[in-house]
Amino acid sequence: MVAGTNLTVLTGDQTLATDNAVVANADIRGYVRITGKNVTIRNSIVRGGAARCSAAVIQVEGSAVIEDVEIAPASPNACLDGVWATATTLTRVNIHGTVDGVKAGNDVVVQDSWIHDLTFYGSGAPGGGATVNDAVDTRGKRRITLRHNVLHPGADANAAYQVTQEGGASGDIRVENNWLDGGHCVLNFAHRGGGPTPLTGIAVVNNRFGRNSMFACPILISTATNLTANSGNVWDDTGAAIPAPDKHD
């Protein structure tokens, strides 16, 4: 969000169903559901409303451009995410205080964004256990790019980026030129979930890694995962190459 902008308060949940609609310079005090195509939210803050479970502050069911937007939940809880996105480009988005930052479906780009300080809960997640926090989470989806972001979900998080095949085949994924840290392992790519094996089609290139993952593990791949590209990835503090991925299920 551009500093100093006067924002118009929109109170209550918003459903954006008109194709090519633009919402700009808004303080949205409710949840947003996008069903139209090519909808834009720009230079705004979205807070959600009363506590809601198994939900996201912004849910994209059509297609969208989300840029210069802060997502700061008014009622954070153990089953509220930031954005559920399909066919969406997120640029300069600041997400914090949710469980997952972005659940990235098919055809999603996250770029120049900051996803940080996600909220861990020891109980209350769907199923009753602790939350599994990821800055970005992909489950059985394709054509996803993470570019030039800062992804640091927090000390208790699972990963900066988690990919599985729950719900279908994952692939055509590119992680490039990001600053990444946190989680048990910073990046976690697992074939589990019923998709084809080996899991392939994932490129990890030219990223800088912090050293604050729980297991000192920049990249974890499962035994049936092969990275299509893995180059130019270094420790941020020294510029030295990170080690080869840990590999286990």
Image (cartoon, rainbow, N blue to C red):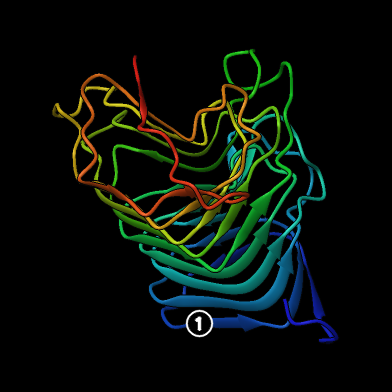
Q: Is residue 233 visible?
A: yes
Can you see residue 57? no
- Please state which amino acid type lies under the numbered disc 1: Ala
Residue shown at the point (70%, 19%) measured from the top left: 124
217 or 46: nearer the eye?
217
In percent of the image, x 52 and y 36: which residue is there?
186
130 left or right of 224? Answer: right
User: Circle 1 — which element?
Assistant: loop
Binning the other alpha carbons within 10 Å of mark 1 as few (below 14), some (14 to 19) or many (20 upward) gives some
> Relative to 103, does residue 247 appear above or below in the rendering?
above
Q: Note whether 215 is above or below 29 in the view shown.
A: above
Q: Quadrant of the N terminus?
A: bottom right
Residue 61, quarter of picture: bottom left
Q: How many tags in the picture?
A: 1
Q: Residue at x 42, y 65 (%)?
A: 88
Is residue 37 left or right of 14 when viewed as pictured?
left
Which picture quadrant has residue 15? bottom right
- Residue 2 location in percent, x, y? 74, 82
